[in-house]
Image (spheres, helix red, strand yellow):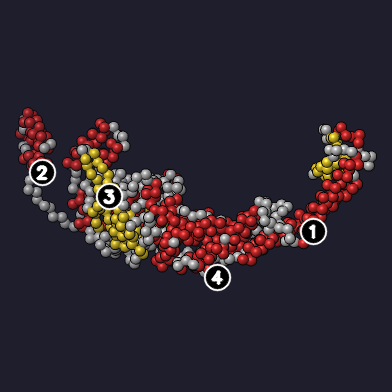
Amino acid sequence: MRAFDLAPGEPLVGAAGALLEYVRTTQGGMPRHLHGFERRRAGGEVVLDAAAVRNLEILRDASGDRRASLAGVLDSTVTAMGSRLLRDWLVRPLANTIAAAARHDAVAALVEEPGRLAVLRELVRQAGDLERMASRLGLSQARPGELGALRAALAALPDIRAELAASPSQLLAALGAAADPLDDLREDLAVTLAEEPPALFGPGTIRSGADRDLDESRGLAHGAKEVLGELEARERARSGIGNLRIRYNRVFGYAFEVSNNNRDRVPPDWVRRQTLAGAERFVTAELEGVERRITSAEARAGERERELFAALVERCAARAGRVATTARALAAVDVLASFAQRARQADYRRPRLVEGARLRLVGSRHPVVEALARSGFVPNDVELDGERRQIVLLTGPNMGGKSTYLRQVALAVVMARAGSFVAAAEAEIGEIDRVFTRVGAADDLARGESTFMVEMTEVAGILRHATGNSLVILDEVGRGTATFDGLSIAWAVVEALHGAAGNGRGPLVLFATHYHELTDLADRLGRVVNASVAVKEWQGNVLFLHRVVAGPSDRSYGIHVAKLAGVPEPVCRRAGEVLRQIERQELKVIEAAAPGPQHVQLELFPAPESAVLDRLRSADVDHLTPVEALNLLVQLKREAER
């Protein structure tokens, strides 16, 4: 156990033992290419939980399509093993800055040498899925066709190693050195396996000249067949049957086939063996003797060929671990080359990995939206740091691009820490230990949890586990309940993330919201800043500029979006009337939510509501006549509507 970094009694011991037993039971034995466990310790990776992987659409988009995901856009790998490793790197980005920078060095070297990049990608393509082949070898289940493919893959290894050794990247050179050349295995396959082996085991699997006994048996079988030809010609001349042929049947063996028209010419020493619809078959003692020689030789050849192939598979299985090591190295080369290929195609830039909790992007773009959009993508900047701009409150209209902006920032962190260049003109990525997301609306019917319950559960996890080096993406927190409930929750969440409750400095936060009242927090909390998505109004219409600017937004333009969506005009018009009434009567929730004593600023001109209240208080309702009361009500109504 200590060899695998496991202590006695540790819970992982039981899990590891159960895993080994499962493999042994399902595979009928322990694969030769598995030699131990790799223990993944906390702190070595940027943690992405299931919600973050789902919300950021790293592996699949919301509809389950892989093409519109981050992996789908970045995956230019040329092997299946490379594609699998790329997905693994994206969901397990590196927290170690040195290791991530080494990947960037490798990608930069390939970007700067497009010729080497093209050659290397073609060579790795020839290697194929060595990882899958290693598992087949480890289980001693390889077929002749698969070994032929393995031989072709191994033939590319010397050139791959030479290209990697000549690279200025230390990581690429190290991967080339880690790739076992497997010269002995390649030589063994070249000597033993046929030039073009069948897909499944059968005659012709083993190369001629590989084994003396096999060659002798094959020679006997082949010589006996030549004797058959000579015997057929001789008996055709003796009997005078011009169309005489020797036929073979799996049940009756070899026989002379004579048509019914020539039965009277059959020599007396022939023995009838089989009757057909239009012919009969006969045998002779000489033909039976030749058949015994052929059958015996073919049986010996088949048995010997099976023995030789089994021995070859066993020798390959003994080298399965070395094949797996080479496969891991080539898969990493494939991913790094894929990153370089995508960087050249999409103009991605190398990020600078800096110390501390910092994040700065200039001209940032969403890699997936940009790749799939028919029109140009509007880039934006972002800057977050733990000292001055810890929390950015992002307001703006629906359809303005707030959610896209939030996701592209998080994806830049994932890409940079995975080893890829990022979709930005400039990028500085700090020491991020975890990415949290609370995006979108979803329920969990199986567990009996509503949309709002799921939202609050995710928010609770963020508040409990986020550190000063985490990146938190929040989109519309609190929108799943009543307006003032949601606003209150969102307000308190921002305060908690800021560290106002005595928890110290909080994480880096991008908080998109339609609660415009929250923008007042920028005046109350020192590390909170406002930003908004710009729009332009023109002749009653709204143009979405998709540009993030400093300062808050005062409107959400929801009714304009409803018009764009096709909501009938009378409904939109009525919604505008209701909105104006609500805005006139809106409570001053900002002052109510502020902690501590509030200083009320006296207004120069009293509001109409104040005048109405003053007249109501001064009215002597006990002595008003019905007509006077009615007149007073009319006057108060007019004043309230001003």
Image coordinates for residue 387, horizontal then vertical, percent? 26, 64
Position of residue 348 measured from the top left corner of the image (x, y, whole percent): 38, 56
Q: Circle 1 — which element?
A: helix
Gap between marks 3 and 2, in whole Å? Answer: 37 Å
What x and y, as percent, mark residue 324? Answer: 57, 62
Q: Quadrant of the C terminus?
A: top left
**C-alpha separation, residue under disc 1 versus residue under disc 3:** 81 Å
* Cα distance between the residues tagged 1 and 2: 113 Å
Judged by depth in the image, the label closer to the viewer, 3 or 2, is: 3
Which residue, given by chain and number where applicable, does mark 1 sit on?
216
Tag of residue 607: 2
Q: Residue at x 9, y 50 (%)?
A: 602
- The reply to whether callout 2 and callout 4 are in contact (CB within 8 Å) is no
Q: Amino acid at mark 2?
A: Ala
The residue type indicated by label 1 comes to Glu
| Residue wearing tag 4 | 3
User: Tag 1 or tag 4, which sits nearer the N-term?
Assistant: 4
